[in-house]
Structures are given as C-alpha cells and as structure tokens.
C-alpha cells in the first residue's frame, strides 16, 4: 500500500510540475528538480528494502536534474514580466 501511494504521489506531482515547467514557472523548475531528487531517495530505499532492480529508477531522475541544471539559463523566469533572462521577449 505504501509503495502504491508513493507512486501515485510521484506521478501526480510530476504531471503538475511538468505543466509548471512547460509554462516557464519558477516553481515548475524547482519542483521538478526537487521531485526528481525525492524519486532518487525513494528508489534507493526501494532498492535496499524491496527489490534491487529499483536501481534502474535512478537513471531518469538523475538525467532530469543534470539537464535542468545545465540549461537553467534557458528557462524564462523573467527579469521583468515580459522578458527572459537574456532579454529576449516571450
């Protein structure tokens, strides 16, 4: 039951945060990194407590974190409400 609830939580959180990331919200960016880190922690626990193959679940969240951190300047959080970081209007 615990694992089912955690999968549901991670899935629903991912859907909401993906929307925030797609529309360029800071909470979407930070939340995606946070939920990816939480997924890594959950997978480490699952690997130790439940099944060693949970190790495979570490790959995708780690890739997301690395990708988002490397591309952080490309996300439009806006210096002003209608400009991106590089001054490009959206």
Image: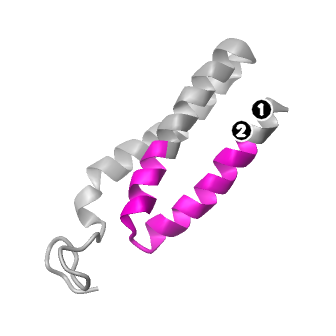
Mark sitting on residue 52: none
Q: Check the image and report above or below for 23 versus 82.
A: above
Magenta-highlighted residues: 7-34
Name the residue located 68 percent from the left edge and 51 percent from the top edge: 11
Question: Would you call the spot at circle 1 few (<14 residues within 10 Å), some (14-19), or many (20 or more)?
Answer: few
Name the residue located 44 percent from the left edge and 42 percent from the top edge: 63
Q: Check the image and report above or below for 17 versus 2.
A: below
Mark sitting on residue 6: 2
Q: Is residue 4 left or right of residue 25?
A: right
Q: Is residue 55 left or right of residue 67?
A: right
Name the residue located 44 percent from the left edge and 74 percent from the top edge: 23
Which residue lies most toward the top here? 48
CB under 8 Å between callouts 1 and 2? yes
- Disc 1: which residue: 3
Which residue lies most toward the right here? 1
Q: Is residue 86 left or right of residue 46?
A: left
Q: Check the image and report above or below for 81 versus 77.
A: below
Residue 32 magenta-highlighted:
yes
């Amino acid at each position: 039951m615990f694992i089912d609830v955690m999968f549901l939580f991670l899935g629903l959180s991912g859907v909401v945060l993906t929307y925030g990331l797609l529309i360029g919200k800071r909470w979407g960016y930070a939340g995606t990194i946070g939920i990816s880190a939480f997924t890594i922690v959950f997978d480490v626990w699952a690997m130790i407590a439940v099944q060693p193959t949970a190790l495979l679940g570490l790959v995708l969240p780690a890739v997301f974190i690395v990708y988002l951190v490397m591309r952080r300047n490309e996300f439009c959080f806006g210096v002003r409400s209608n400009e991106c970081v590089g001054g490009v209007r959206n």
